[in-house]
Amino acid sequence: AQSVAQPEDQVNVAEGNPLTVKCTYSVSGNPYLFWYVQYPNRGLQFLLKYITGDNLVKGSYGFEAEFNKSQTSFHLKKPSALVSDSALYFCAVRAWKDSSYKLIFGSGTRLLVRP
Amino acid sequence: EAQVTQNPRYLITVTGKKLTVTCSQNMNHEYMSWYRQDPGLGLRQIYYSMNVEVTDKGDVPEGYKVSRKEKRNFPLILESPSPNQTSLYFCASSPKGSSYNSPLHFGNGTRLTVT
């Protein structure tokens, strides 16, 4: 079955430390992968995407993600976390399903950055 | 400002009372979609529309209706709401949705409670 998994419900880091939010996927063919962020009482905002090219993708707010085909992962990273990065993060993958492309979202990971 | 606008932001209703959640985008996007967000389940697609007068079911369409009479508007209709439709709803749009090359633009959400 085509799916995307975010194995951690919550990630806690101290401000200034590096952060990683994990995402693994299972789709047939070449994956299109996305990260979105949701701040409280707001809709999801696009952070970055991988379609083809360099495995390291840079996005908004200093975030980056590394595509690893052998491990079928697309982990979100940031070298130095800010308190304002605290939010809900969603990984998504494009999958061929029911005769059309669909976007499948992970269950979300809450990032808490403590001062 | 380019945006997706949903109304209302909060809605409390009773079982069986028909309601409509409006969604409008000012970016001339062809593709629009409705999602519901539930804890631990991520976002699940309800209905989507590739263009005017073209709509199709997503993963959880039961109990919902949509229409796309104009390019900018994509209302979500609950003819007879039930408590299991209590959720956070998001409308989203993108220039063209068929291949999901482009990121989705999300509204700020509608929190619906059905008692």
Image: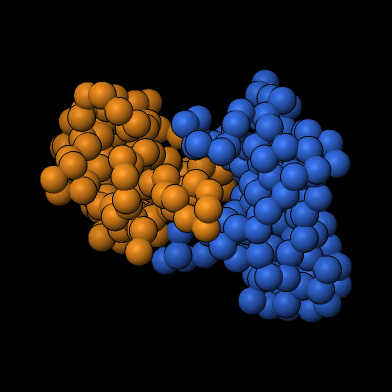
Question: Where's residue B46, x and y in %?
Answer: 63, 58
**The N terminus of chain B, quarter of image:** top right
Which residue: 78% across, 65% down? B78
Question: Is residue A80 visible in this depiction of the protein?
Answer: no
In the figure, is residue B19 to the left or right of B58?
right
Total marks placed? 0
Judging depth in this view, the residue of B57 and A82 nearest the camera is B57
Display colour for chain B: blue
In which quadrant of the rendered view does residue B5 lie? top right
Which residue: 56% across, 47% down? A41
Question: Is residue B50 visible in this depiction of the protein?
Answer: yes
In the figure, is residue A22 to the left or right of B5?
left
Judging depth in this view, the residue of B53 and A99 nearest the camera is A99
Judging depth in this view, the residue of A53 and B28 nearest the camera is A53
Q: The chain drawn orange is chain what?
A: A
Judging depth in this view, the residue of A83 and A93 nearest the camera is A93
In the figure, is residue B74 to the left or right of A32?
right
Question: Where's residue A5, x and y in %?
Answer: 31, 58
Q: How is the image coloured?
A: by chain
Which residue ends up furthest to the top in the rendered image? B1
**The C terminus of chain B, quarter of image:** bottom right
Which residue: 57% across, 37% down? B97
Which residue ends up furthest to the front in the rendered image? A99
Which residue: 84% across, 36% down? B70
A43 over A58 or under it: above or below: below
In which quadrant of the rendered view does residue B114 lie? bottom right
Question: Where's residue B100, x and y in %?
Answer: 49, 37
